[in-house]
Image (cartoon, rainbow, N blue to C red):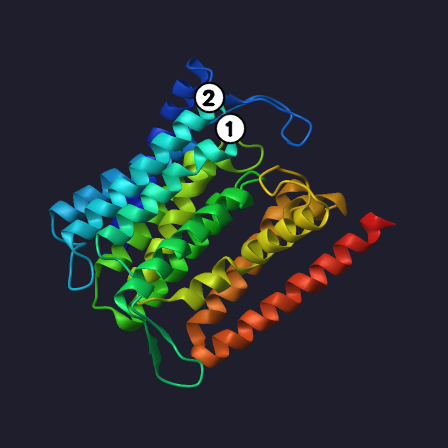
Amino acid sequence: MFYFVPLLIAFTISLVLTPLVRKIALLTRIIDAPVARKIHKKPTPLLGGVALFLSFFITTVIFWIFGYITDSKISDINIIAILAGGFVLIIGGLLDDKYNFKPYQQIPFPIIAAGIIVFSGIKIQFISNPLGGILEFSLLAGILLAFFWILGMIYTTKLLDGLDGLVTGVTTIGAFIIFAVSLFWDVPSSGTSVLALILAGASLGFLIFNWHPAKIFLGEGGSVFCGFMLGTLAIISGSKIATALLILGIPILDVFWVIANRIWQGKSIAKGDNKHLHFRLLDIGLSHRQTVIFLYFLTAAFGVTSLFLHSKGKIIALGILAAVMIILARVICTPILR
C-alpha cells in the first residue's frame, strides 16, 4: 500500500499546479502559436514542464525529508543532483519558451544537467553481457557513458514531443516499468521505486490536461526533463540500459532515421520537419488520439517484455524492435511516396 502514497501525492500536486501554471503562461503570453509545421489549430500555453517538475520536486523533497528515498544506492548528493539538474533544464526551457532560442542556445542546459548528474557520482558501472556475466567499465568510461546516455535520452523525448500527450504518456509508462524493474533487485520501498512512482504520478496528473486536444503543452523544459529523468532512473535502477532502450526504442530509432534522412538530403539536422513517425502515422489516416495510443501500445509492449527477459532475450527483443521500426517505415512511407 505504501507505493500508492508517492504516486497519489505527486498526481494530486500535478493536478492542482497544472491549471495554475496554465494561467501564468496565458498571462505572460508564453504560448505556442500555430505554424505550418505544427498541427495544433489554436494558440496553446506552454510551461507545462514547470508544473510537472514542481510536482516531482515537492513530492521528492517530502519523501526525502522522511527518509524514504536515500539508501545504499541513492545518496543525498544524488538527490540534490537530480533536483538541480531538473531545475537547470526547466529554467532553460522556460527561457526558450519565452524567447524562442536557436538550437545552439539550447545546448548548454542539457549539458549542464547531465554534467551535474555524473559529478554527483551517478555513472554506468556495468552492463549485463548477453553472453553471460557483466561488462564492467572504468571510472572514466562509466562517467562518459552516463553523460552521453542522459544527453541521448534528453534529446529523444525532446524530438518525440510532437503530439498531445505523447511524451507525457510514454514517460508515465516508462516510469511504471522502471518501478517494476526496481522490485526485482531492490529492497522494499527503495529510493529508486519511490522516485519512479513520483515521476509516474506527476506525469499522469499533467497528462489529464495534456491529452488531445491539449489545454497546455510541456514546452521545452518539460520535454527534456522527461528524458532526463528516464535516463537517470535507468542508471540508478541497476544500469538497466536495455530496459530503457526497449521503452524508448521506437522514438530512438525514429530519431536516427530522421537525422539520417536529413543528412542524406543535405538538410540541417537541427531544422524540424514532419518526417517523424508520429507525423507519418497521421499522414496515412490515423487520428491524433489513435496515433498516440498506438505508440503507447508499442512502448508498453516492449517495456513490459523487458521485465521477463534476461540479457540475451533483451538483445533479441531490441532486434525485433528494430525490425518493427523498419516495417513501419516501409508500410508508412510507401503510400506517401506514391
**Residue 15 shows in this picture:** no
Q: Is residue 210 left or right of residue 204?
A: right
Rendered image: mark on residue 309: none
- Return the mark for residue 215: 1
Q: Residue 64: x, y in percent?
A: 16, 48
Across and down, in percent, residue 196 comes to 32, 54
Residue type highlighted by circle 2: Tyr
Farthest residue in the right direction?
338
Could you give the CA–CA distance between mark 1 and mark 2, rounded to whole angstroms?
Answer: 21 Å
Whether residue 168 sits left or right of residue 320 in the image: it is left
Q: Where does the image place residue 335, in percent across and percent down from the top left?
A: 83, 52
At 30% from the left and 36% from the top, the residue drawn is: 87
Tag 2, which secondary structure? helix
Could you tell me which residue is drawn at 19 percent across and 42 percent down?
61
Q: How many marks?
A: 2
Q: Position of residue 31 (x, y in %)?
A: 50, 22
**Nearer-the-camera pick, 239 or 281:** 239
Q: Using the rendered view, name the quadrant where residue 108 is placed.
A: top left
Above or below, 289 against 1 in this view is: above
Q: Check residue 99 in the rendering and tell me which mark sits there, or answer none.
A: 2
Q: Looking at this rendering, what residue extends furthest in the left direction? A: 66
Q: Is residue 146 left or right of residue 1?
A: right
